[in-house]
Image (cartoon, helix red, strand yellow):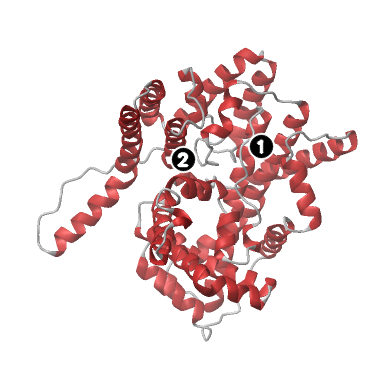
Amino acid sequence: MVFSSILFLLYFLPVFLLVYVLLPKSAKNGWALIVSILFYAWGAPNFLYVVLGTSLLDFYLVNALYKTTNQRNKKIWLSISLSLNLGLLAYFKYANFFIENVNSVLASIGINQLAWTQVALPIGISFFTFQTLTYAIEVYRNEHPPFDRPTHYLLYKLIFPHAIAGPIIRFKSVAAQVVDRKETPDDRLLGLFRFAIGLAKKVLIANVLAKQADLYMGGELSALSFDEAWLGILAYTFQIYFDFSGYSDMAIGLARMMGFRFPENFDSPYTAQSITEFWRRWHITLGAFMRDFLYIPLGGNRVRQKWRLYFNLWLVFLISGLWHGASWNFVLWGAFHGIFLILDRLFLLKLLERIGKVPAAFFTFFIVAMAWVLFRIENWNDALNFYKQLIDYKDFKFIESNNSFIFIFLIAIFFSLFGRSKIGSKAAAFLIAQNPVVSLSNAVLITLSIILLLFFSIVFLSASDLNPFIYYRF
């Protein structure tokens, strides 16, 4: 079940919210957990027992870690917890990839290939694995005590707004909210508004752009013209932003209606003036996780040798690419970004400062778009063919795009920049404020906006095929 479906919007969500609001505070967590389990079971019933079983096991492992006073034993319990969760991720997400590559090598040297049955990928495993890692590590570091109840841990891990595709929630930032939280009428209103904005991003913008991206990046790539290739990659560049940021908005909005405050995940990334800045604005929770749990433990900026600093940066983004998917194109995508982060450190940041903000932003956008080619196209030869079409300006067809696509494309550009304007910044600050005061006039305006956004989104959904979120498969 996806957020941008008629089933979720007209049946699942209204029933959940109605019961949640009417229940006493003591029963809200129980209802949220039951619904979250049903939500996950709807999409992956065969894996529910794996998720629940390993979650309960991990809960008791981390509690044993917390209770022991012997540092050596703490490390043993931590190692068992990390091995359990990373082992599950490795098996379900990377076993097929590993065996396929081993068999390719064996076939090339004339040795019989390994027999193997394909392993299905549990929905959301990349995201909820990170939830378990932050839980164990932050308890080990004494940053926060563990939950007393297994139901609290299950809710933290499986709560349906973020269980499938994030944002990645740090245990210490949400632990107190799981146990005790308040949701005010203003929170419910602003949460629903945030959800409606995210739904509109997905349905009214990303899905329209997806048709053009699929048309020009999903067929015979060597037959594309110069302008078709550019139209395809620009459509995909904005599609993935509005698709993923739309999901994040919906998740943050749903959580806020329940009294949770999830971290922001995007901050106008296509206005960034360097790749370094881009990664401070794109998938912010992933960047923070990689920094705190991988880059800093590797030495961070404290290493003495420059080569090691650059290698650590590159390695972190290589792993980040592999986290997105068990395929070489994701590895290349991560390595590509890692190289430009190194170039930023070497000379590129100074150069971009000299050429000015606007040229620097255009250059960064160009680099990001070129990297999306690797992200979107799995086969390396196909990606090379696509790159060739991007520079073969002689093959220009002057294609005619439909007016609806052109209109939505311009809307996408506008809202990609809007967040950095004064009005956009004020609107964003109001939406994410911890304790906002919503005046009557603002409440009326927000309510009307919600009605319009939901109405048009549902109308578009009713007339279109299901288009799941890109990050659902990660």
- What's the residue at 65%, 78% (across, down)? 355
Please state which amino acid type lies under the numbered disc 1: Gly
Q: Residue at x 40, y 29 (%)?
A: 45
Which SS class for mark 2?
Answer: helix
Please give the label number shown on residue 127: 2
Q: Give left or right: position of 183 versus 466.
A: right
Q: CA distance from mark 1 to mark 2?
A: 18 Å
For mark 1, what is the residue? 253
User: Do we see residue 433 in this rendering?
Assistant: yes
Q: Quick one: 355 or 428, which is closer to the camera?
A: 355
Q: Please, what is the three-letter code of the amino acid marked with disc 2?
A: Phe
Horizontal arrangement in the rendering, residue 53 relative to residue 348 (left or right)? left
* Disc 1 secondary structure class: helix
Q: Residue 93, how many percent across, how many down?
A: 34, 44
Compared to residue 376, the image places residue 24 above or below, namely above
Mark linked to residue 405: none
x and y percentages locating residue 296 in the rendered image: 45, 50
Residue in view at x 15 percent, y 49 percent: 114
Residue at left offset 58%, top offset 63%: 235
Q: Position of residue 473 (x, y in %)?
A: 44, 46
Q: In this orientation, does residue 400 appear?
A: no
Is residue 67 depicted above or below 418 in this figure?
A: above
Q: Position of residue 351 (x, y in %)?
A: 59, 76
* Quarter of the image where one finds residue 251: top right
Please name whichever residue, 172 or 406, is drawn nearer the observer in this view of the structure. 172
Q: Farthest residue in the left direction?
A: 111
Above-or-below relation of 23 to 280:
above
